[in-house]
Image (cartoon, rainbow, N blue to C red):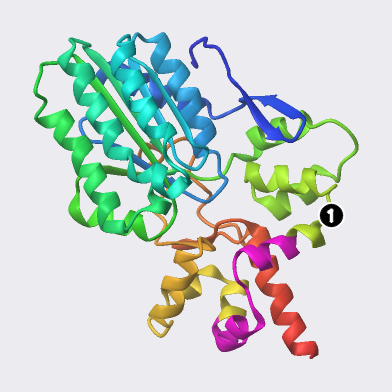
Amino acid sequence: MVQVMRRIRLGFAPGLELEFVDRDKAIQQIYEFSKKGTRFPVVIYGPEGCGKTSLLLQAVEILREQGYSVIYFNPLRRRFEAEVGIESVRQRVLNRLKQVLNEYEFARLIWSVMDLAIEVLKHGRKRLAIVIDDAFQYLDPREAATIVKGLLEIIEHPEESYEKIVALVATSEGVSRFEIGRHRWGELTPMWNMSRKGFEELYERIPGSKPSFEDVWRFTGGNPYMLSLLYRYSWRVDAVISVIVSEKGLTRWFVDLWREWLEKVVEDPDTVSDLKFPHSLRDELVRRNLIVHHLRVRDPELWIDEPPPERDPEIGIGKENAWQVPLYREAVRRVLAELKSS
């Protein structure tokens, strides 16, 4: 049973805030982390826009309620919070972060956040939570892995004794995941888009007229960011696909170069695991966050929240590989169609 807690409100779209919904199993997992601490940094990875940031912000609230000093850092949103009870230390780091000019520089000051964590322990705080969100896209994969190692060092070899440490890190599906996993410095744990039931609850909270839930599910596969994008573009699927084509660099040149293989991946994402599938294309699809390669077995204990189904061709999920979002598949399909008609 999910424990009673304050559910945070999140910006869903300009002018619209919605309460955090669903993710009941994930919430229970956060409570378990708070009870025991984390033996290794927990590195949560999954599709872009699947709700990792929302979950971590809710986790911050839970950990505060459980008596933790909490440090939260998100370069993408230029957000730094530290409720550590040591104002002078917090202010010193905050002043340094205020001097940076862009998200890339902000991310590179992540070591200042690590220094803050060490300082907090020196001041006798016994329960510490370090939550780092969406920092790795600005870092070289090797540097990202080193950050995880740094968190592990704080857990394993602290300068001061402590009761519990919770270290949570989130990253989008991509190359940093493989670099981190190669060193075994963190506990890589996948997270997927929202379950059908939870996603329908989120859909129902959106005001105004909207397409049927079945249509929205078919295009988003439970991805809350794609839902917000559809809402912002007045439910115009073609407009959202145009945005995706541009943002993902799905140029006619790129799609034409790999036309034969992309036609197969559109029909079945498990084609990516074919022994003849070009590794360079596979790596590019992963780098662009279009597909998730080598999905973990669907054992619920090995996932944050609920795992995806074993297969679901309608929304582009195979046994070993999946399109991060069905609309990504539709974007590739559109460019393929344009090439055929030209």
Residue 299 visible in image: no
Measured along the vertical axis of the image, is residue 280 above or below residue 129? below
Observer-nearest of 327 and 76: 76
Measured along the vertical axis of the image, is residue 117 above or below residue 236? above
- Residue at image point 18% right, 53% down: 183
Observer-nearest of 37 and 17: 17
What kind of residue is marked 1?
Answer: Arg
What percent of the width, then of the height, locates residue 155? Answer: 17, 29
Taking the magenta stretch, the answer to whether it contains residue 329 is: no
Q: Classify the position of the C terminus by image quarter.
A: bottom right
Name of the residue lying farthest toward the right: 209
What percent of the width, then of the height, locates residue 271? Answer: 49, 75
Measured along the vertical axis of the image, is residue 163 above or below residue 42? above
Observer-nearest of 274 and 73: 73
- Residue at image point 34% right, 56% down: 176
Taking the magenta stretch, the answer to whether it contains residue 251 is: yes
Query: Crowdedness of circle 1 by 10 Å Cα count: few (<14), some, many (20+)?
Result: few
What percent of the width, then of the height, locates residue 312? Answer: 60, 57
Name the residue beneath numbered marker 1: 236
Instruction: Classify mark 1: helix, strand or loop.
Output: loop
Q: Which quarter of the picture shows residue 13?
A: top right
Q: What's the magenta region?
A: 241-261
Provide the major secondary structure of the magenta segment. Answer: helix
